[in-house]
Structures are given as structure tokens and as C-alpha cells.
Amino acid sequence: MSSSASPYLVRVHDLIRRPGESRELELAFPAPARLGEALIAVEEGSTVEIEGRLDSIHEGVLVAARARATAVGECGRCLGPVKKTIDVDVTDLFAYPSEEEFDFHIHEEQIDLEELVRDAIVLALPFQPVCRFDCPGLDPETGARLEDHPELTPREALDPRWGALAGFQAESDEPSEGGAATR
Ligand SMILES: [Zn+2]
């Protein structure tokens, strides 16, 4: 017996067994738990907005909405802060219990958007977050943020293993396949 119901629960009693009926869906609440586990995540307490519509159809209630939240984390290159707006499509059918072939179901005249929204947001989180696409990262020798120390750039050999690769590229410099250009 939890004292407060999940904010992801939506009552749909007004849409049950009334195909053709529809109404707007608009929710905004603090995330009851962190969404994501990697370098970047939507923190607990951060606002989650869900906006769209609910349509009653023969098999259940169709949710067609967008979920929005702000993810924060660390740049994978320079460890600086990263902030990213996540805006994802959350569309799925919440079927009546008798409709077994669907993933989500209506329980006690309610639909629970948590799994649908959480999965969509987590999937949209960048795997390798960067503060900006051309973030120069850290100086390999001093660990200083190159952004703050322009005198340390340019510095090509970030990894000694690249030395051998660079030599290889120089040798095979003649025009080869050129796949990208001809496609
Ligand atoms: Zn960065």
C-alpha cells in the first residue's frame, strides 16, 4: 500500500469500451526515479512532460504522445557538464486484458505509462555524451581541458597506437574504392 500513486498512472475509465472517444493527455511531474544508468541520465526529481492524446479503439486505449525531459551528465571526452533535451515519441496500445497479444494492458481502468516512457527516454540517451560534437577533450599528457588551454593544441597523436595507423594511411594514399562519393 504505497501512500502515493505513481505519476505515470492515468485513469481511462471515461474511454473504456467507447471506441471513437478520445481526449488529450497532458502530464508533468517530477521523475520518481532516475531514468538511465550511464554517463547521462534524467535525474530523479527532474520534470517529465507527457503530451499527446488518448484514443479509445476496439482493442483498448491508444496512447499517441511525446515525452520530454532534460538529461544531465558528463562529457565523455572532457568530463565537463552535458545537458540534453530528450523529446521522444511514446505511442502504443494499452489493450483490454482479454487481448493477450499486446505488450501493455489496462488494469483497473488505468494505464501505466512508466515502462513505455522510461524505455523511450533511456533509448534516446546518447551512448557517448559530448558537451559539443567537436569537443577537443583532455590533453593526454597533463589531463588539462584543451578547451581551456588553446596553447596545447594542435596535438594529433592522442594515442601512440595511432602512429602506426597514420603510416599505413600514408602508404595507401592512392585513390581507392571511393565508396562514399559514388553511392
Ligand atoms: Zn567536452
Image (cartoon, helix red, strand yellow):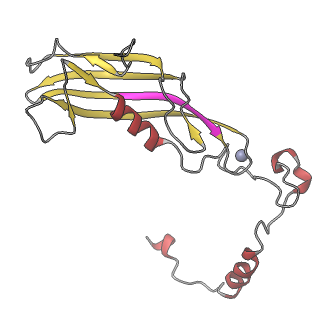
Give the percent coordinates (x, y) of residue 139: 83, 56
Q: Residue furthest right?
A: 151
Q: Tell which of 47 and 147 is nearer to you.
A: 47
Query: What residue sits 39% from the left and 39% below the top?
Result: 119
Viewer-nearest residue: 103 or 27 = 103
Quadrant of image for the N terminus: top left
The correct choice, above or below, for 156 with respect to 35 in the image is below
In the rendered image, the vertical position of residue 90 relative to residue 18, given as above or below: below
Q: Is residue 111 left or right of residue 20?
A: right
Query: Is residue 145 within the magenta segment?
Result: no
| Image quarter of residue 87 | top left
Q: Is residue 67 magenta?
A: yes
- Where's residue 124, x and y in %? 46, 42
Q: Is residue 95 left or right of residue 68?
A: left
Which secondary structure class fits the magenta region best?
Answer: strand
Q: Position of residue 143 (x, y in %)?
A: 84, 53
Front residue of 88 and 31: 31
Q: Which residues are magenta?
A: 66-73
| Residue 14 x/y as whole percent | 16, 11
Which quarter of the rendered picture does the C terminus lie within? bottom left
Q: State the image quarter where residue 84 is shown.
A: top right
The residue depicted at 51 percent of the width and 42 percent of the height is: 125
Residue drawn at x 69%, y 79% as measured from the top left: 165
**Who's the residue at 18% across and 19% down the image?**
108
Question: Does residue 41 appear left or right of residue 155 in this picture?
Answer: left
Count of number-bearing discs: 0
